[in-house]
Image (cartoon, grey):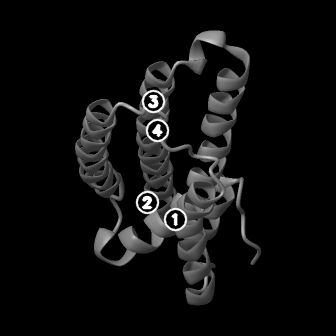
């Protein structure tokens, strides 16, 4: 089996057919971690720009609270979508689906962000930049969980049909 890094539906099909080996599952998990780590270290996901320490501290605090809430809600959303034997399937399905979803979503979201930053003159304000960066980061996180959950639901349907 080959890795499907942009075709999440192919990953779901392979999972439904139980043709994703443990080594491949580990590979998807590694890619999932790298999907967030690499863009941060390459500065594709930018840091806040505001020099006002109070503003920056509030932005980081708001971001932290909202990201934690999105992660808790997102994981639980995905768990609810995993309807066929979640005890055996949830972590494997989530890890394998998260990799291509996070990769493709991040590419789209951060490309749009950087294009907007380059083309919109009002974006040069540190406050506008930081606020929009926060919104893009939250949107990326929410979209990733939503997309993974939708693929998990389709995967559950495929497994249900296969059981007959």
Q: Which residue is mark 2?
A: 160
Q: State the image coordinates of residue 46 (x, y, percent, origin top left).
A: 56, 43
Q: Quadrant of residue 30?
A: bottom right
Q: Quadrant of residue 37?
A: bottom right
Give the mark, 3 or 2, whose residue is nearer the N terminus. Answer: 3
Which residue is located at x 31 percent, y 55 percent? 75
Q: State the image coordinates of residue 41 (x, y, percent, origin top left).
A: 60, 60
Q: Secondary structure at mark 1?
A: helix
Q: Secondary structure at mark 2?
A: helix
Residue 23 or residue 53, whichever sits in front: 53
Which residue is located at x 67 percent, y 44 percent? 107
Q: Which residue is mark 3?
A: 130
| Depicted 91 relative to depicted 62: above or below | below
Q: CA distance from mark 1 to mark 2?
A: 5 Å
Give the mark, 4 or 3, whose residue is nearer the N terminus. Answer: 4
Q: Which mark is residue 162?
A: 1
Q: Secondary structure at mark 3?
A: helix
Can residue 105 be spotted in the picture?
yes
In contact (CB < 8 Å): disc 4 and disc 3: yes
| Depicted 87 relative to depicted 143: above or below | below
In contact (CB < 8 Å): disc 4 and disc 1: no
Q: CA distance from mark 3 to mark 2?
A: 45 Å
């Amino acid at each position: 089996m080959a890795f499907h890094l942009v075709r999440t539906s192919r990953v779901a099909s392979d999972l439904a057919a139980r043709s994703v080996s443990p080594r491949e599952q580990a590979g998807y998990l590694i890619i999932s971690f790298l999907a967030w780590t690499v863009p941060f270290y390459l500065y594709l996901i930018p840091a806040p720009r505001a020099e006002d320490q109070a503003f920056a501290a509030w932005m980081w605090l708001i971001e932290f609270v909202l990201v934690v809430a999105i992660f808790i809600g997102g994981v639980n959303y995905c768990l609810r979508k995993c309807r066929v034997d979640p005890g055996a399937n949830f972590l494997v399905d989530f890890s394998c689906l998260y990799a291509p979803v996070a990769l493709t979503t991040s590419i789209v979201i951060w490309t749009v962000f950087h294009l907007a930053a380059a083309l919109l003159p009002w974006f040069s304000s540190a406050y506008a930049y930081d606020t929009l960066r926060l919104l893009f980061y939250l949107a990326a996180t929410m979209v990733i969980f939503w997309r993974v959950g939708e693929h998990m639901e389709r995967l559950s349907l495929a497994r249900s049909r296969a059981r007959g």
